[in-house]
Image: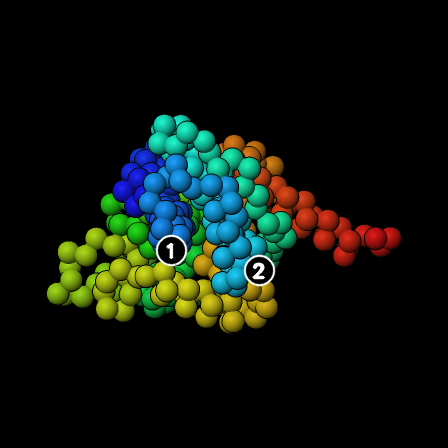
């Protein structure tokens, strides 16, 4: 089974163009399922029944997994067994009618345009680190990049003359335009701040965004930065590294952008991922209406 699982993971990496994080989720899920099969002493895919899958779902629940996590496991198994069925590795698909537990839909927290303006105005651009932070925050909100893509950027991925960047941290690389304010912040950082953050012993570093050691800034490093600025801005919402990405997409849709364009800019393989922002936009507008209308 583990050999088949490895072939399946290679297949979805090449054919589906999933991000590294999504691939790692599939990898963990399928590996965990293979561990479970070994406890049942099942070695061949045709030996697996629908009852075995239900027992696995129950085992996940007994381990304290949330409904959302169990639903993700179920989706991973449906995809895995679909691969085996259409690849003629099994004669029947026991996951065909595998049910997922109901999950309460939770929308991500988004910032208002006013909160975004306040957050992005906080870095002290008289300092190299402030120039870096300003460039990162402006770029994240202007592009909708994933944080993994942001910290994976190299200097060569930036074209200041034509005002675009090329994403580097996802399976589907894409070219994303920059608005002037993001371009200007990035230009100031590259021409001034980055040179001060580089260390003499590390002059060949290709990373765009550097930490105090002159090496590539990490996701964890960015997490600390955005938490710091959120506290300074007195924003009480739950801020995560993806908050500006979610705000970017929602504000685009609120201002008339079409879903297909937003999907492309966000790097979503599945349009249903982008559909969430349309629902979030409607929810946000309803909240504004209820607070502002005198008869609401």
Quadrant of the rendering where the N terminus is positioned:
top left
Name the residue nearer the viewer: 286 or 88. 88
Across and down, in percent, residue 201 comes to 12, 65
Q: Residue at x 57, y 70 (%)?
A: 234
Could you tell me which secondary element the residue under label 2 belongs to?
helix
Colour setup of the view: rainbow
Across and down, in percent, residue 225 comes to 41, 66
Name the residue nearer the viewer: 253 or 37. 37
Q: Are marks 2 and 1 in contact (CB under 8 Å)?
A: no
Across and down, in percent, residue 292 comes to 77, 54
Q: Residue at x 40, y 40 (%)?
A: 47
- Counting labels gives 2
**CA distance separating discs 2 and 1:** 52 Å
Across and down, in percent, residue 85 comes to 41, 31
Q: Residue at x 30, y 58 (%)?
A: 209
Q: Nearer the viewer, mark 2 or mark 1?
A: 1
Q: Sequence-wise, which precedes: disc 2 or disc 1?
A: 1
Name the residue nearer the viewer: 82 or 296. 82
**Taking the image as drawn, is residue 57 in sight?**
yes
Q: In the displayed image of the protein, which residue is found farthest to the left?
A: 201
**To which residue does mark 1 refer?**
39
Could you tell me which secondary element the residue under label 1 belongs to?
helix
Label 1 crowd (10 A; few <14 / some 14-19 / many >=20) = few
Residue 115 marker:
2
**Taking the image as drawn, is residue 6 in sight?**
no
Residue 127, above or below 77:
below
Position of residue 216 in the picture relative to residue 133 (left or right): left
Q: Residue at x 41, y 60 (%)?
A: 134
């Amino acid at each position: 089974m583990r050999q088949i699982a490895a072939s399946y993971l290679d297949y979805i990496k090449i054919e589906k163009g999933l991000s590294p994080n999504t691939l790692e989720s599939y990898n963990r899920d399928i590996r965990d399922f293979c561990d479970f099969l070994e406890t049942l002493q099942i070695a061949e895919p045709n030996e697996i029944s629908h009852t075995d899958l239900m027992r696995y779902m129950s085992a996940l629940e007994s381990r304290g997994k949330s409904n959302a996590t169990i639903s993700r496991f179920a989706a991973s198994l449906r995809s895995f067994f679909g691969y085996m069925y259409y690849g003629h590795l099994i004669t029947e698909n026991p996951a065909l009618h595998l049910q997922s537990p109901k999950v309460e839909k939770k929308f991500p927290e988004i910032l208002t345009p006013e909160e975004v303006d306040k957050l992005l105005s906080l870095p002290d651009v008289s300092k190299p680190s402030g120039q870096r932070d300003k460039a990162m925050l402006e770029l994240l909100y202007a592009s909708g990049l994933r944080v993994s893509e942001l910290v994976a950027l190299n200097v060569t991925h930036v074209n200041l003359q034509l005002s675009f960047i090329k994403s580097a941290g996802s399976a589907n690389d894409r070219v994303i335009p920059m608005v002037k304010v993001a371009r200007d912040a990035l230009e100031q950082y590259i021409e001034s701040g980055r040179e001060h953050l580089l260390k003499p012993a590390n002059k060949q570093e290709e990373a765009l965004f550097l930490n105090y050691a002159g090496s590539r800034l990490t996701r964890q490093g960015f997490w600390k930065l955005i938490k710091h600025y959120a506290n300074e801005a007195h924003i009480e919402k739950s801020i995560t590294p993806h908050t500006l990405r979610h705000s970017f997409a929602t504000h685009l849709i609120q201002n008339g952008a079409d879903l297909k364009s937003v999907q492309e800019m966000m790097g979503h393989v599945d349009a249903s991922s982008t559909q969430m922002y349309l629902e979030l936009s409607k929810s946000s507008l309803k909240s504004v209406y209820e607070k502002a209308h005198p008869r609401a």
